[in-house]
Image: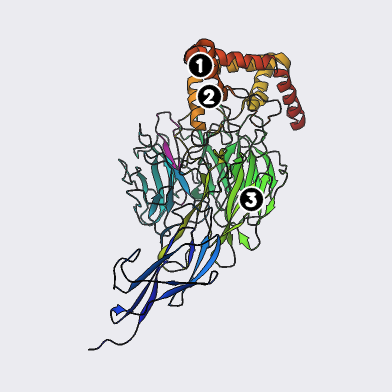
Amino acid sequence: MRCRHEPLVRRLQPRTSTVSTSQQLVLATYSVDCGLPYSQPSVTVAETGETLLLRDDGSGWDEAAGDGVFTTTWTPPRGGTFTLTFPDGSVVTVQSDADLKPGFPIQTWHSAGSFQAGQGLHVLVGNIDTDPALEILVTGLAGGPLYAFKADGSTVPGWPVLDPPGAAYPALGRLTAGSSALDVVAGHFAIQARLSAYSGAGTPLPGWPRPPANYMSSPPTTMDVDGDGVDEIFTDEQDWNLHAYHGDATPATGWPTTGFIGGQERSMSAIADLDGDGRLDVITTSGSTSPGVYLFAYRHDGTLRPGFPVNFAGSVHTFPVVGDVDGDGVPEIIVTGFGGRVLIFSNTGVLKRTVLLQGTWFYSTAPALADLDGDGIPEIIVQTNSHLNVVKGDGSVLAGWPRALPANTTLGNASPVVGDVDGDGLPEIVTVVSDNNGSGGGYLLVYRRDGTIIPGYPRRIAGLGNGAVPAIADIDGDGRNDIIVASDYWNGTSGYYNRLWAFSLGGPTPHGPILWGQLMSQAPGPLRRRPRRRRLGVDDHARRSGLGHGDVEPDRHQLRGRLLRALRERHGRDADGPAERELGLRRLERRVRRPIEYVHGHHQRHHGRDGDIRRGSDVDGVEDRRRGGRGDVKPCGHRLRQHLRGGLLERHRRHVDGAAKRELCLRRVERRLRGPGESVHRHRQRRHERDGNL
């Protein structure tokens, strides 16, 4: 038998037809005839006119001489798009991006199957091992596995995990007592679903996995609501109930909730102290049915709070968030509703305001909360199919917004995140949009807080598909906040596809704070513990579906809200003049003299990875004047970090400790309240007159 002359020439690498990289790229192709090497192949680069000869000599990236596999490497000479034509006629489009971090994009397996689309598909970032750099978690589609990658793009040892086959919806939490790293918990969209929990090494935690009542289609939420130092896990199991488990997989007392109200889904939960009793509450929504969507608020023990549930005209999927968006000192619950609306509910379930946005969405969108204008009150940021909207809690629109998104694009699975990504110390809004023309591509968008777009954007990403909720995090600890973007693209053929991109826009270090870093405000950084006392915040005591945000509210809001009410009760008149300062001083004295050690440690963790004091996260003192706060004064917690140690060393000739630290902080507070406090009070009066709530 003789071999018939039929040469086989086929591209081996890159495996995909689109590649995003600014690094060296390996090019390889088969070229064989009758089991022997055929003619030497070449690849042409249209934009540069290069002809690249591939070699089968065992040198460089070529693994073995004479095996019929011809190899070479090529590096994009500059930023831009390049077209590479291979000997078999196939074409690879290479996008070179100077902002793309080394090791990215990362490819994951994508095959046929079903999964729940929407904002539940998100980039999850946190520290799951002893390495100080952060890890990135993302699910393979449609059947898994769950991947974990390091900041350089390499795979974390022990990952990926596949239990069971199916799309994974992960979160991070402290499930192991005494652990310095976060654990991973994930629900699965699968026929034989599992609720699984893993260590950072990818091994199942004791007691896990456990079978759910049904399947799961959104990430769990983790937070320590009972104060034992270990997070509880709150999850939907598509059975009309919200379930809660301890870190050892045993059900939490009082859970699951019961009641066949609304659709069978229970949304990804928000966790916040709604009434100031020092205990965290759990807020979730039902799936959509003909009566609409139901908003639930439960106490930590699973009992329903008065005033709930509340019915409203909602979307197919809802992502509730919590924050004091109108500056009254009391948190509101914010949800998106049918027809492009934002609904703002009080902490007792009363609808306070409905805000009509520009644009609508098909199934869902996830709002973000962040203080963009520096007034200490977070704005509400919502992406629709056509616009990116920024509105205030009083219903007004922030100047410069909304912004029209690129033509012929749609929301897809995305929603915005907020943080400083260019080193100017001010927040940017980051999101992605998807082409609606079937190309499978999309764009990365980065807007300044005034609505102008960063130069070089929108940035085209081939193979983005419908995208996912991006993340902002300093993944490698270099002091710069990175942008991490994920894809869900699939062309119908099982294989590896570009799944993760990480971009760094540079700028001076350290970058400013991350205000809303991930889906439902999963801010990366050091592990934060449950607070010992209640502090309102941008996200109240934030949900840690991933990693808790831990933002806290400035005392301006407490003085405007809670202090005014307390003074009216105690003095029988409006809070004014010395009475207001007197009560404010007494409250500050209690905080300075008792919980100061904890507060100082909390502020250190806040500084931690963000590298800057978080505006509006005034954990200890009066108010924050970091950027010209119009009569505000700096918080004592911040002063302690930067000034008190030096001042006491000079005055007391010893380490800052104990009574001396508290004494000096108290004297600083007293001087500000009894001296310059007049200007602070006048500023507060002007704000009351403007808001009409005095």
Magenta region: 216-234
Give the Cα separation between the discs numbered 3 and 1.
46 Å
Location of residue 428 in the rendering, given as x and y in whole percent from the top left corner: 61, 45
Residue tagged by mark 3? 454
x 32%, y 42%: residue? 205
Q: Which of marks 1 and 2 is nearer the N terminus?
A: 1
Q: In this view, does 496 lie above or below 202?
A: below
Residue tagged by mark 1? 594
Quarter the N terminus occupies = bottom left
Q: In this view, does 219 lie above or below 21?
A: above
Query: Residue pushed farthest left?
Result: 1
Location of residue 677 in the rendering, given as x and y in whole percent from the top left corner: 70, 18
Mark 2: few/some/many CA within 10 Å (<14, 14-19, 20+) = some
Residue tagged by mark 2? 641
Q: Which of marks 1 and 2 is in front?
A: 2
Question: Which amino acid is tagged 3?
Answer: Ile
Residue 586 falls in image quadrant? top right
Front residue of 687/115: it is: 687
Q: Which type of secondary structure does the marked residue at label 2 adopt?
A: helix
Give the Cα separation between the discs numbered 1 and 2.
18 Å
